[in-house]
Structure formats: structure tokens, C-alpha cells
Image (cartoon, helix red, strand yellow):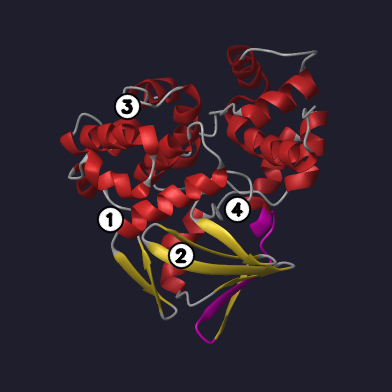
Amino acid sequence: MDIKYKGNNLIVRGLRDFNTEHIFDCGQCFRFNRIGGGTYFGIAKGKALKISQSGDEVTFFDTSEKDFYETWFDYFDLGRDYGAVKAELSRDSVMRDAISYGGGIRILNQDLWESVVSFIISASNNIPRIKGIIERFCAAFGDEIEYMGNTYYSFPDISKTASLTKDDLAVIRAGFRDKYIMDAARKFNSGALSEEYIRSLSTPDAKHALMTINGVGNKVSDCILLFGLGRSDSFPVDVWIKRVMEYCYFDGEQSIETISHFAEERFGSMGGYAQQYLFFYARENKIGVK
């Protein structure tokens, strides 16, 4: 990895296994949006970022070296050897095909609280609407962020969210999810749950703790574990994963429990990486769609 500067922009060359389209279009985050070609804009960890890729050159616009190493290096999981991850998973022929479509995926290390609320909002929802609800939530209750001459908004913190009422949340138009957001905020704000406590638990116990939040079920908790806690042994099963697993590994329809157990046995600690490659592969190729 080679870093250079051009004006206020930080340019990284030689990034392997990194593709902005694969990373931001594989369903793992909701605040980054394509603004043209391989260029995306979004907000994470209280910072805004415009990022663009051309070949193996990735430009972080208006980004200092301090911000790159303190925020974005970890966020994009740049310290992990995804070549080794892909080599291990490619022992499986289905995974080998899936990886060929999304080989530039990296699992983002997202903020736990943001993941909790975002995946609560994601339940029984589609991506454009999820993004709209989250942006309204941030614009109404987040803190201002100045970036490249414009004002954006951070994700509202736990204490701010816990102070809101159902009437306050009406502006974000989240529907029945309002009460689940409020329950999550109150549990974290009161200390009934905390990031430190959840991180100290095994993956099954952390899943159980997350499911004490109203509205957090099997799939939502698995998403939080994977994207908010970095638990790569978590394998969220949504409609695309169910379809691709049934199509590629089973002869016909299976229960979510059966698929989850199979994935645990098949992929083990790499289940989260497998899930992301399979999700992108399934959606790009409409696998299992009749």
C-alpha cells in the first residue's frame, strides 16, 4: 500500500481485494451512496467521506493522514488479508463462483449503536426506504458535520435518542419501528445493555443479549453481530441468502434454522465473509428468483 497526496486528497495505491462498488452495494451499510462510477459519498464514525476508485488507485477526498489511520483504515478493514480469506473459502466450489463476482468486498467495521438502529429499521423494509429513514433520523437529531464546504449530520448518539418520544420520531417516518428504536436507546442508556458488556460475550450470548431489545430477532441480531461487532462467525439469513443457499447447496426449500446450521458447519468462523460474497453473487445474478 502506497500513500501520496494531491492537494487535500489522500491517494492510496496498491490496495488489494478492494472495490468500492462491491463494498457499498452488498447490503452491509446504508449511509454511503454512489454519486457516479466508482465514486461514493457517505458518513461513518462521525465523519463524512467522498471516496473514488480507479483501478488500484483509491482517492479519499479532503482526508488527512490522521483521519485515514484513525478512522478509515479500521472502517475499511484494511489490516486484514482478504486474499487469505478468499483462498480458504474458495475450497468450496460455490464460494469460488461467488467470490469471482464480489472479490473486492470488505466487511466494514461499523459503529455498534448505528448498526443496532439501522438493522432495526431494515426489518421488513427495502434499501431505498431504509436509507431515507436513516437520513431523516440523522438530519433531525444528529450533530452537524462540515465537509468540503457542505453541512451533513452524524448518526444520533444513544443519549440523544433515549431522550426522544414517539411524537419526536414521527418525523423520520419509521412506522412500527419507532418503538423498537426507543426500546434499544433506553436499554443502552440505562446500562441494561452496553457495548463493553456485549463485546465481552461469546457470539451466542451476545446474540441473546441483543435479542432482549424489542424488535430484534434472529436476522437483525445476526446483522448487528457481523457488521457492528465484527463477529465473522455470524451468518445472517435474508431472502437472498435463503434463495442462494437452497439453490446451490440444497434440493428445494429449507428452514432458516437448517440453513444457519449448515452454514455454521460449512463456513465456521468465516461465515460472515461467506455470507457477503453469497449475498452479492445472488443479487447480481438473481439466483433462485423464479
Amino acid beneath label 4: Phe
> Does label 4 or label 1 sit earlier along the sequence?
4
Out of 210 and 11, give the one closest to the viewer: 210
16 vs 212, left or right, is right
Q: Is residue 54 above or below residue 219?
A: below
Amino acid beneath label 3: Ile
Q: CA distance from mark 2 to mark 4?
A: 20 Å
Q: CA distance from mark 2 to mark 1?
A: 28 Å
For marks 2 and 4, give the one nearer the viewer: 4
Q: Residues within 10 Å of mark 3 (few under 14, many from 20)?
A: many
In the image, residue 18 lies in the stretch drawn in magenta: yes
Q: Residue at x 30, y 38 (%)?
A: 195
Q: Position of residue 153 (x, y in %)?
A: 35, 63
For marks 3 and 1, give the one nearer the viewer: 1
Q: Secondary structure at mark 2?
A: helix
Q: Residue at x 45, y 37 (%)?
A: 119
The residue labelled by disc 4 is 24
Q: CA distance from mark 4 to mark 1?
A: 24 Å
> Does label 2 or label 1 sit earlier along the sequence?
2
Out of 279 and 232, give the one closest to the viewer: 279
Q: CA distance from mark 2 to mark 3?
A: 34 Å
For marks 4 and 1, give the one nearer the viewer: 1
Residue 19 seen by the camera: no
The residue labelled by disc 2 is 69
Q: Residue at x 44, y 66 (%)?
A: 48
> Does label 2 or label 4 sit earlier along the sequence?
4
The residue labelled by disc 1 is 141
Circles 2, 4 touching at the beta carbon (< 8 Å):
no
- The magenta segment: 7-21
The residue labelled by disc 3 is 213
Out of 48 and 226, give the one closest to the viewer: 48
